[in-house]
Image (spheres, grey):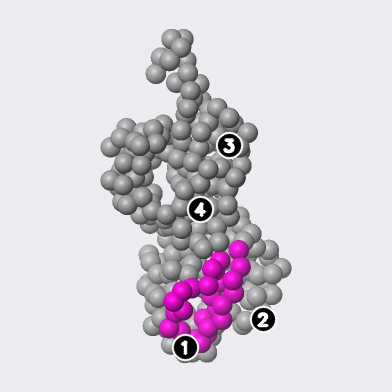
Amino acid sequence: MAFRILILGGTRDAMTLAEQLLDKPELDPTYSLAGRTRRPLPPALPTRRGGFGGIEGLKQWLMEHDIAAVVDATHPFAAEMSHNAAIACQELDLPLGRLEREPWEPQSGDDWHPVADLHEAASKATELTAPGDALWLTTGRTSLPAFEGIADRHLLVRCVDAPDPQPAFDQWTLIEDRGPYHLEDERRLISDHNVAALITKNSGGQAAHPKLDGAREAGIPVIIIDRPPLPPATHSFQSPEEITQWLEQALRVIEAYQTGSGEL
């Protein structure tokens, strides 16, 4: 029996889940990438790229491919995709398992300034720093237009891919790099570029956490963007392992029902 799963991926946790499912022949997953990153980490699973065409397009794809369950392992700030998945699964009565990456929490010695969105982050950055200071942006290449109004500051941008088109910054430096990052390297970056403040999204996870440790050690403020609200999923998990167990259990229940040895 085919138990077809759609994994909405694009994160390292999603890649970990994909690797775990490679040796689960009883499961039949398809890994989906939105296409925002030009050089995504390719999973070994069957993969599709690009959008679905909104909620109705996603519903059509799920029905055409006879999907039995959906896993939302997207980035915590991929709000549109998570919203579409939640509504589509609700309307089709499909189980949706969401990998809920724990948000970062401030520690003793942190100087955090939570903000609601990118534009508030840009405004807060000018309040906390002086002309000539360097601002370290780790909010992703598609977010850069929100910071184009900042004047008299050098913007240090780190992202996986170079922005295209390039942002209209007066002074900026681009670092193309992909995590996981290491504390010693973050310390060196802060020192070499005279970083006065860090601007980041509250993405959670361990791969990018060293930048927060480096900022704490250097005594610089962190402007941190809160996560967008999401509709609830039918199931919530904290790790790829929990999702794998959930999928295996769901398959056993279905098999038992079809063979007459159990009930749904």
Up the image or down, 98 lies above or below 66; here it is below
In percent of the image, x 61 and y 37: which residue is there?
22
How far apart in space, not on screen, are marks 2 and 3 (Cα)? 42 Å
Are the residues at dot 2 and dot 3 in contact (C-beta closer than 8 Å)? no
Q: Which residue is mark 2?
A: 192
- Toward the viewer: 48 or 128? 48
Q: How busy is the neighbourhood of tag 1: few (under 14 within 10 Å), some, or many (20 plus)?
A: few
Quarter of the figure with residue 110: bottom right
Q: Position of residue 152 (x, y in %)?
A: 47, 90
Q: Residue 10, labelled with which disc? A: 4
How far apart in space, not on screen, are marks 1 and 4 (Cα)? 32 Å
In percent of the image, x 68 and y 63: which residue is there?
182
Kind of residue at disc 1:
Asp
Choose the circle earlier in sequence order: 1 or 3: 3
Confirm whether the magenta stretch covers residue 228: no
Q: Which residue is mark 3?
A: 21
Confirm whether the magenta stretch covers residue 161: yes
Q: Which residues are magenta?
A: 153-178
